[in-house]
Image (tube, rainbow, N blue to C red):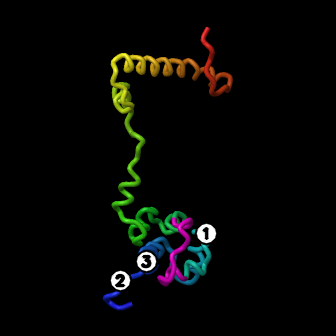
């Protein structure tokens, strides 16, 4: 490779893995064998990877990242497999960390009619009460699921 030639993807992968592997203690005689064992990939693959000749099967990225102590996303970005921007876009959680009010839930669901909103609030409250009533029964008799019949 000359100074003008950009590194190959395999060379970038090696440049990301090698220092992390060294920091994780994979040094000296048998380092590749230990890394291969810990990551669950063939030693020949690890040897070729460290030389910048190959990239392991993507199925092994997570185990490899774990073995060398890097978050898998960081490994993939450093190696040039994916861009940081693409990870940011694809990993935005759709799950909220904070609870939302019934009003916010109705808004999110697009329930705008006042009567529909009242029905929604009532249904949710009824389900909450029903769940609270059933919780002690589940703890006492080990039953789970199912809706109790109203009497």
Question: For the C terminus, which image quadrant?
Answer: top right
In the rendered picture of this protein, how many numbered marks are placed on residues? 3
According to the image, label 2 marks what residue? 6
* Of residues 131 and 113, the one drawn nearer to the viewer in this rendering: 113
3 part of magenta stretch: no
Q: Residue at x 35, y 63 (%)?
A: 84
According to the image, label 3 marks what residue? 9
Q: Residue at x 34, y 21 (%)?
A: 113
Q: As drawn, which residue projects farthest toward the top? A: 151
Q: Tell me how far mark 1 sits from mark 2, CA to CA.
A: 30 Å
Q: Are marks 1 and 2 in contact (CB under 8 Å)?
A: no
119 left or right of 64 in image: left
Q: Tell me how far mark 2 sits from mark 3, CA to CA.
A: 9 Å
| Above-or-below relation of 73 to 9 | above
Instruction: Give percent across and percent down for residue 86.
Output: 37, 60
* Of residues 56 and 86, the one drawn nearer to the viewer in this rendering: 86
* Of residues 129 and 138, the one drawn nearer to the viewer in this rendering: 129
Question: For the N terminus, which image quadrant?
Answer: bottom left
| Above-or-below relation of 88 to 65 | above
- Label 1: few (<14), some or many (≥20) within 10 Å? few
- First to last magenta residue range: 48-61
Instruction: Give percent across and percent down for residue 109.
Output: 39, 31
55 part of magenta stretch: yes
Q: Residue at x 56, y 73 (%)?
A: 35
| Above-or-below relation of 74 to 103 | below
Q: As drawn, which residue projects farthest toward the bottom? A: 2
Provide the secondary structure element on which disc 3 rests.
Answer: helix
Residue 40 tag number = 1
* Of residues 115 and 34, the one drawn nearer to the viewer in this rendering: 115
């Amino acid at each position: 490779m000359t100074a003008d030639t950009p590194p190959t993807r395999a060379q970038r992968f090696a440049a990301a893995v090698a220092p992390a592997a060294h920091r994780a203690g994979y040094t000296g005689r048998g380092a590749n064998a230990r890394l291969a064992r810990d990551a669950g990939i063939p030693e020949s693959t690890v040897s070729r990877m460290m030389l910048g000749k190959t990239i392991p099967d993507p199925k092994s990225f997570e185990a490899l990242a774990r073995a060398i102590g890097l978050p898998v996303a960081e490994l993939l970005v450093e190696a040039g497999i994916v861009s940081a921007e693409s990870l940011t876009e694809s990993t935005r959680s759709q799950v909220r960390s904070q609870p939302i009010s019934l009003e916010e839930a109705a808004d999110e669901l697009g329930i705008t009619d006042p009567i529909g909103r009242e029905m929604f609030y009532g249904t949710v409250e009824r389900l909450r009460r029903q769940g609270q009533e059933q919780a002690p029964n589940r703890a006492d008799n080990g039953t789970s699921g199912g809706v109790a019949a109203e009497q």
